[in-house]
Amino acid sequence: MPNRLPLQFERAYRVVAVSFVIAIAWDSRFWLQTYRSHATWRIGGLLPLVLVSFVFLGGSVGKLTEDYWSGDAMYHLFFAIQNDAKFATLRETLHAGELSRVATWYSRVAILGEICIAGAMLLPLRIGLPVALLMVIGMWIVSPMGIINALAAAIGLLFAGVLVALVPHGKMPSSA
């Protein structure tokens, strides 16, 4: 069994990860406020959604292979060797066959989730942004903690997009 990080390091890593998401959201919000012409503000909510959707579209298409659909790729990436507490606990409590079935369904749900995030850009903006944001946050929760390096930018961009989309039409933030 692989060695796990001491608990204090896992907690510190979570704090850094959350700080990373907050910093990206804050930077995105600052950019949107700095360049707040009417045209920029109008597309300010759409741009993050389109960017994140296309990234996940590429990720989902890349996972449409036999190895991912059968769960073999996820089993070897996450379930067999991952040090994260979730996967270590699953390894300790489930038999090999059960763990393989869980990996198969985990992989299939991940593929379908990525397809749904990619399709969120087809929804109205005020629905698509929160749906995509919640799904990316959910993906972070059920994945190894290290995945925040890949998901933090998406979470920050979508969060800033949600903030922009919630501003009533015709209203722009005042100058600071």
Image (tube, rainbow, N blue to C red):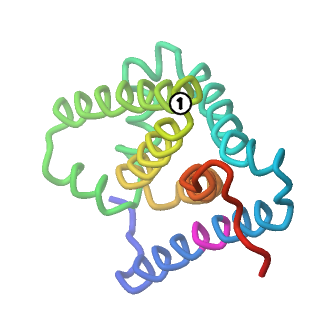
Vertically, is 174 above or below 39? below
Pick the quarter of the image with the C terminus.
bottom right
Q: Residue at x 52, y 16 (%)?
A: 64
> Pointer 1: residues within 10 angstroms few (<14), some, or many (20+)?
few
Question: Which secondary structure lies at badge 1?
Answer: loop
Q: How many numbered discs sit on the rendered protein?
A: 1
> Of residues 4 and 123, which is closer to you in this image?
123
Residue 139, percent from left and from top: 42, 46
Q: Residue at x 39, y 86 (%)?
A: 8
Q: Residue at x 68, y 39 (%)?
A: 46
Q: Position of 161 compared to 107: left or right?
A: right
Quarter-of-image position of residue 96: top left
* Amino acid on which disc 1 is placed: Pro
Residue 102, percent from left and from top: 24, 34
Pick the quarter of the image with the N terminus.
bottom left
* Label 1 sits on residue: 124
Residue 26, percent from left and from top: 66, 71
Is 128 magenta? The answer is: no
Residue 142 visible at all: yes
Q: Position of 18 compared to 44: left or right?
A: left
Vertically, is 2 above or below 62? below
Q: Residue at x 35, y 44 (%)?
A: 79
Quarter-of-image position of residue 60: top right
The part of the chain drawn in magenta is 20-24
Vertically, is 39 above or below 66? below
Residue 152, percent from left and from top: 59, 58
Residue 155 visible at all: no
Q: Report the magenta stretch's main SS.
A: helix
- State the residue lying farthest toward the front: 170
Is 23 magenta? The answer is: yes
